[in-house]
Every structure is written in structure tokens, then in C-alpha cells.
Amino acid sequence: MTFSSAASRSVVPALLLCALAVPSTMTAADKDKKKDDKPSIQIKVNPAIGFAPFRAVLTAEVRGGPDDYEQFYCAAAEWDMGDGNKAEQSNDCDPYEAGKSQIKRRYAREQIFDTPGEYQVLFRLKQRNKVVATGQTTVRVRPGIRDGGLDDRGGDR
């Protein structure tokens, strides 16, 4: 963009200054909506595929939402491994205080899958017996040495 006169060149900095001084267009209702956004659960498995017996580290991460989201505060964590194994973890917590109480953002578990197959691993956050959030991932277990899936050199038969 080019300006031909000194008067037009002096207007541009003034316009930029005005644009920077304009307050945010986010209203109080928008801020309340953002505060009420429900966090979501993302599950990761590392590694996602392996040979039986297969050791996997599962991680559930709580993404988004406010740090004091009441439904997630002091929630019990339940893992369903998809192979018949389940585990639940709960905590003793102080009473909930809005703006002060912090939700847990990360849950981890190590699991050994002994049998080849594809497993749907489910993670649930629960308040009492009510499920407040879920996430899932898939774990793939290939036949290992015990199952006749590998030759003596470690390759597939």
C-alpha cells in the first residue's frame, strides 16, 4: 500500500493505535460459555502394537475446559482393558471449592496383554456410579514366540 500525501501517512498510525485500543469483543456470556466448556478425554497407548506378551503404557489426558471443572474433580478413574481386566482408582479429596479445586489432568496405567488380539481399551471418569466422561483406544497384540508367531530369528513365520 502506498500513500501519496503526508496527511494520509499520518492517519495510518492513528488508525493502528485505535485498533489496538479496542477492547476484546468477547462478551461476558462468551466468557461464561468458555468456562462451562466440558473437558474431553484423549487416550494414548505406547506402543500401540506389539507381540504377546505385550507391555503397553496407557495414558488418559483431560483436555480443555476449566481447571476447576466440578464434575471431574476427585472423580474415580476406571480402566477396562477389553480383555476381561478392569481396574479402578479413587482418591480422597478436600471438598470442592469453585476457582480453587484443581482437576487431575493425567492418568496412566501399565498393562500386559498375554493373548494375541485387538482390544478396545475404555477409560471412564466416574462420580459415584455415574460416568461423567469416557475415552477409548485400540491395542493390537500379535502372536509372540509362545504362540508360534515368530521364528528363532524374531521374524514372522
Image (cartoon, rainbow, N blue to C red):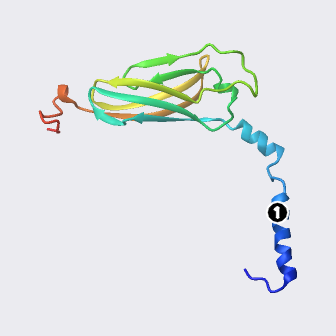
Q: Residue furthest front?
A: 6
Residue at figure coordinates x 70%, y 24% from the top left: 101
Residue 47: % across, % down: 36, 36
> Is disc 1 placed on a helix, strand or loop?
helix
Q: Residue furthest right?
A: 7
In this rendering, the answer to whether 97 lies above or below 14 is above
Q: Residue furthest left?
A: 152
Judged left or right of residue 33, residue 6 is right
- Name the one closer to the observer, 119 or 47: 47
Residue at figure coordinates x 63%, y 20% from the top left: 74
Residue 132: % across, % down: 61, 27
| Residue type marked 1 | Ala
Judged left or right of residue 103, residue 82 is left
Q: Residue furthest bottom?
A: 4
Splitting the image into 4 quarters, where does residue 85 fall?
top left
- List the residue tagged with mark 1: 19
Disc 1 packing (10 Å; few <14; some 14–19; many ≥20): few
Judged left or right of residue 3, residue 128 is left
Q: Quadrant of the N terminus?
A: bottom right
Say how many tags the image has: 1
In this rendering, the answer to whether 53 lies above or below 20 is above
In this rendering, the answer to whether 1 lies above or below 101 is below
Residue 52: % across, % down: 26, 28
Q: Quadrant of the C terminus?
A: top left
Residue at figure coordinates x 75%, y 22% from the top left: 97
